[in-house]
Image (tube, grey):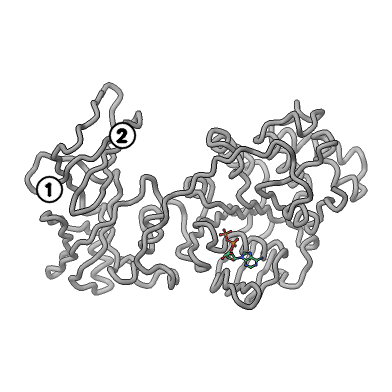
Amino acid sequence: MADLSLRNVKKIYDNTVVAVQAFNLEIADKEFIVLVGPSGCGKSTTLRMVAGLEDITEGEIYIGGRKVNTVPPKDRDIAMVFQNYALYPHMTVYDNIAYGLKLRKFPKRVIDQKVREAAEILDITELLGRKPKALSGGQRQRVAIGRAIVREPQVFLMDEPLSNLDAKLRNQMRSEIIKLRQKVNTTFIYVTHDQTEAMTLGDRIVIMKEGFVQQVGTPQEVFHHPANLFVAGFIGTPQMNIFDAQLIRDGERYFVELGGLRVELSAEKTARLLAGDVASQPVKLGLRPEHLTLTDRDEAVFAAVDVSEMMGSAVHIHVSACGQDVVIVVPLSEEEETENLPMGLPVRFTFRGSAAHVFDAETGQNLEYPRAEPSQASAVEEAPPAEDSQDAFPEEPEEMTEEALAAAKLGDPFEDY
Ligand code: ADP
């Protein structure tokens, strides 16, 4: 158990690649923090600096109040679970979990107790006698987590631990990690490129892009109050629709105008825009697909159906409107049945003023939050489509991987792998 502090942390690789910069974060004891962002944004680098597997170019990292910049990884009291965490193929699950403790000369009785406790937490007690080869991908990853749990680290680091699993297993393991977190009372930092994982696991989420933190907040905060266009597009599925629109200030009231429809912004939004003295201007207007409603009224945005997708509990209607593709999510009630809407069908939609997000057309900054987190890298640009890695778990545990080497540095006995 420990709190962490990252102060103005910067990492430059090989004097050229700036991987992370201006990273500031205070992590409370027992908090579950998720670092999320597209590939290459600096998540793993940040995690590896906390672990001590990468030097810090500038800034300071504190764990439990102790500055650890020059403390070797194995003395940081950290455990890390990786994407490809190789297990010893010739050892049983029990021995895989116990091995590190054996090397550290813990008494047999203590080892047995710790292994069984970890197995209980991870629901793998009945697998303790098996070899890794006879385990599914999800079970292997649980064993890997078991190895980390028995060390009772101050901080638990996880680097994309689920991305080698297929979609179904990933969902299952996600719930397992939520349970794990309730049972293992420690501080977690979890890296993923998957916004759903971030939203479901994190107490707070750190959204990164090109080495810069874009926003830090609870899942609710980043969903309802995205600091900029990048966060708006990255968090939430289907992605937020972004339109070129007009913000109009009329005295103490604000409106947005889109495709001939004028909607007054909610009192809450109006108050924030007034506080920032925001003027009428062209904006990027963000509207989540689930906040668009079909209507018969004339005051509406006119659209034509491209395709509709039946998702079970909702229909996702893809339409063309205002010269672009737009997604509308229409929830379905239990007894409701719907047929797919034919291509070209004219429809109209509207939205409420409380659902409209207005962003600076140039910088992408949310106009309600002009002084939010630094976002140098957030110029207007949509977030990339969500990645979906469904690669199969490798059949055979890997050779001495880079990750196993890293584990060795963190005090796990992989040298003789
Ligand atoms: P993420 O985990 O978000 O995918 P990384 O932290 O792995 O991103 O990488 C951030 C940036 O640093 C990328 O541009 C990546 O190419 C670069 N990078 C990562 N590791 C190294 C390294 N060992 N040497 C040089 N550049 C690296």
At 36% across and 54% down in the image, what residue appears?
Answer: 224
Pinpoint residue 163: horizontal percent, then vertical percent.
Answer: 59, 45
Tell me the SS state at disc 1.
loop
| Mark 2 or mark 1, earlier in chain | 1
Q: Residues within 10 Å of mark 2 (few under 14, many from 20)?
A: some
Pinpoint residue 209: horizontal percent, then vertical percent.
Answer: 48, 64
Give amino acid for label 2.
Answer: Glu
At 73% across and 33% down in the image, what residue appears?
Answer: 120
Q: Is mark 1 within 8 Å of ligand 1?
A: no
Q: Residue furthest top?
A: 335
Rendered image: mark on residue 82: none
Q: Residue furthest left?
A: 298
Q: Is residue 23 above or below residue 155?
A: below
Residue bearing the label numbered 1: 300
Out of 165 and 118, give the one closest to the viewer.
165
Residue 179, image quadrant: top right
**Picture quadrant of ligand 1:** bottom right
Q: Relative to 169, is 77 on the left or the right?
A: right
Q: Is residue 295 above or below residue 232?
A: above
At 76% across and 36% down in the image, what residue appears?
Answer: 117
Q: Is residue 333 above or below residue 235?
A: above
Give amino acid for label 1.
Answer: Ala
Pinpoint residue 253: horizontal percent, then vertical percent.
Answer: 15, 65
Q: Relative to 208, is 312 on the left or the right?
A: left
Q: Residues within 10 Å of mark 1 (few under 14, many from 20)?
A: many
Pinpoint residue 90: horizontal percent, then vertical percent.
Answer: 85, 36
Q: CA distance from mark 2 to mark 1?
A: 22 Å
Q: Quadrant of the N terminus?
A: bottom right
Rendered image: mark on residue 309: 2
Residue 65, image quadrant: bottom right
